Amino acid sequence: MQTNSAGTIVVGLDGSRSSELALAWAIEQSRLEHRDLTLVHAAAHEDPETGPALMVRARQVIEHKAPGLPAYERIEAGDARDVLIGAATGAAMLVIGSRGRGPVHSALLGSVGVAVARHAPCPAVVLRPGNPGLVRDGILVGIDATEHSRAPLEFAYRQASLRRLPLTVLHATPAAVPVSSVPYIVPGEAESLDDARLLLAEATSGMGEKYPDVNVRTRVVTGPARSALLRISQRMNMVVIGSHQGPAAADVVPGGTVPTSVLGHATCAVAVVPSDL
């Protein structure tokens, strides 16, 4: 059994319906990127039989959906967070479901999912529940004015190109805060709409040359990035965010930070991309 996951698409398996969706998505991603697949299971010490059984079922799915796709297996005893993050080291991508099995029904999007997505050394895609019959509008990526947005932006362009989907690039500017009857923006946070549009134009012009096949739309919204991403992502195939919380992404407000809130509430796939790729 080969356990080296370098350069592969890594998918976490736990037997839940959510991990089955993650497996199907990862198989398609492996096919699109012409990469091998690595199947990972974090085994409980008291349950040595579940892992091998999951691998058998996963290989049956692979044979049905993508015959001949190379797939490696990695079964390790330990905490799911540590096992998944370890398997993601050197990988091209990590894919997990949003609802897990276990003593706390951990919602891979409780402690496990958020930790894995936020700290994985490669892009991490979380398959969120949603309405499968809904007509969706492509890929959404949120960017700010920092260099940390480059990696999420390029990831979004690449996925849009691979999947032949339109791309929406979103930038949120701080909302005016009303004092008495006069709105104002906290000094140092002011950003004009013209500045925001210029930022988007500059960001997309460079990527447009690299991915000329991608149909791109840009949007500037006023208010918290977290709220805008969740609202617009309701009709998207995927929303892409950075793991770094820059000035425009640091919505530390009731409901949590941008990555945590989007991971917990989005109704489409969520990709969390490290800024240092």
Image (spheres, rainbow, N blue to C red):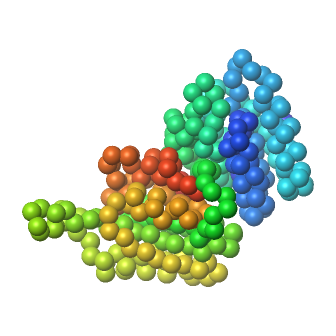
Which quadrant is the C terminus positioned in? bottom right
Residue 116 image point, x, y percent? 56, 41
Q: Is residue 114 above or below residue 270?
A: above
Q: Which quadrant of the view contains residue 48? A: top right
Image point (60%, 75%), residue name:
166
Q: Is residue 22 above or below residue 185?
A: above
Q: Is residue 260 above or below residue 75?
A: below
Q: Is residue 107 above or below residue 190?
A: above
Image point (53%, 61%), residue name:
234
Residue 243 image point, x, y percent? 47, 52
Which quadrant is the N terminus positioned in? top right
Image point (38%, 73%), residue name:
220
Image point (56%, 73%), residue name:
167
* Count of number-bearing discs: 0
Residue 66 falls left or right of residue 25: right
Q: Is residue 6 visible?
A: no
Residue 154 falls left or right of residue 187: right
Residue 243 falls left or right of residue 194: right
Q: Which quadrant of the view contains residue 191? A: bottom left
As drawn, which residue projects farthest toward the left?
180
As drawn, which residue projects farthest toward the top?
46
> Which sits in the foreground, 268 or 213?
268
Q: Is residue 209 visible?
A: yes
Residue 262 image point, x, y percent? 48, 52
